[in-house]
Image: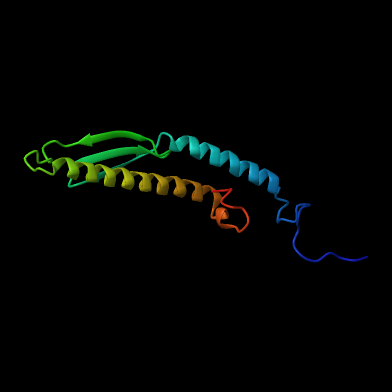
Amino acid sequence: MSKRRGSRRGSSGLPGGANPMAMLQKMQQDMAEAQENLEHETTEVSVGGGAIKIVISGHQRVQSVEIDAAVIDMDDEEWLTDLQDLLVAAVNQAIEQSQAMAAERMEQITGGLGDIPGLGGLLG
């Protein structure tokens, strides 16, 4: 009689008989839930010493733009250009923060699996 050596493995070859398909399905479900939650999570960006505040969702949808008129110098001939520049900066920062927030949520679920070569970012 021969004796088997090594750890106990299930038919999947993974320790404890873990089912890779079930694990993948659970991960996909968790990712879908996280994507849904990101729609309601927001981040706020303030630029120009509080002149402009933008609130954006985890889906990169601008929720609100607030301009503090007291900070805008209406006597300055270039105020419109300054305001436009501040708006561009604020929107870009808000998008970057929103994308970082979304990436962080996905990383919590995938645990870095999105970095596996050949998956093309499929998991995150």
The answer to whether residue 52 is above or below residue 118 is above
Front position in the image: 9 or 34: 34
Front position in the image: 25 or 66: 66
Task: Tell me which residue sits at (13%, 40%) in the image.
Answer: 72
Quadrant for residue 45, please give it. top left
Question: What is the x, y in percent for residue 81?
Answer: 19, 43
Along the horizontal axis of the image, is 74 left or right of 23? left
Residue at the left extreme?
75
Along the horizontal axis of the image, is 41 left or right of 65? right
Residue 50 visible in rendering: no
Question: What is the x, y in percent for residue 47?
Answer: 22, 46
Quarter of the figure that contains the N terminus: bottom right
Question: What is the x, y in percent for residue 109?
Answer: 53, 47
Along the horizontal axis of the image, is 21 left or right of 88? right
Residue at the front extreme?
77
Task: Tell me which residue sits at (29%, 33%) in the image.
Answer: 64
Question: What is the x, y in percent for residue 68?
Answer: 16, 37
